[in-house]
Image (tube, helix red, strand yellow):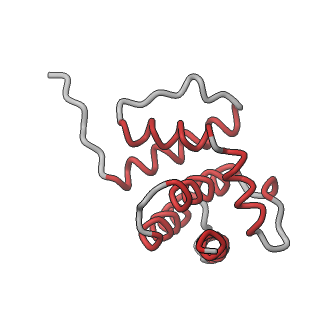
Amino acid sequence: MNETKKLTRREEREEIIKALYQIDINKDEISFLSEIEFVNNSVKGITEHVEKIDEIIVNNLTKWNINRLTYIDRAIIRFATYELYYTETPHEIIINEALNLTRKYSDEGDNKMVGFTNKVLDNIKNYLKK
């Protein structure tokens, strides 16, 4: 039997973050393809709009440069910014999911990166409301 396991939305988000991480490191999004429509559409949307997404992020980083972010943190913040700007997903869900991903993949147990990501995404949320 050749059944593909159905992923939860959180697991799909993790796949997106992993893909963005690889794309950022390798500078090659052409080779990415997933069997999951949400993952494909999100990765494609982010790579097509990365300049606008990065502009929004840069405008909301305080005393920080986007290139100083780790690859994984940049992937998480780019994905969350894409969702905040281009989708109808409630902002609370987007930010909460981004913080969970940060806890899992980036934070060292001191909640510093979680706090940083939360502040940046809150700034972006308020910026986009204007």
* Quadrant assignment for the C terminus: bottom right
66 left or right, relative to 7: right
Q: Position of residue 23 (x, y in %)?
A: 64, 35
Quadrant where the N terminus is found in the figure: top left
Residue 58 occupies which quadrant of the picture?
A: bottom right
- Residue under the image location 42 percent in, 60 percent down: 88
Q: Position of residue 40 (x, y in %)?
A: 45, 35
Residue in the foreground of this view, choosing between 73 and 111: 73
> Is 101 located above or below residue 123 in the figure?
above
Asked whether 130 or 81 is in front, the reply is 130
Percent across and percent down for residue 21 are: 62, 43
Residue closest to the eye, 38 or 106? 38
Relative to 12, residue 92 above or below: below
Residue at far left of view: 1
Seen at 70% across and 60% down, the residue is 56
97 vs 2: above or below: below
Tell me what residue is drawn at x 48 percent, y 43 percent.
42
Q: Is residue 6 left or right of residue 108?
A: left
| Marker count (numbered) | 0
Q: Is residue 49 left or right of residue 96?
A: right
Rendered location of residue 85, percent (x, y): 56, 59
Residue placed at 83% from the left, 61% from the top?
Answer: 65
**Quadrant of the rendered structure where residue 76 is?**
bottom right
Residue 129: image quadrant is bottom right
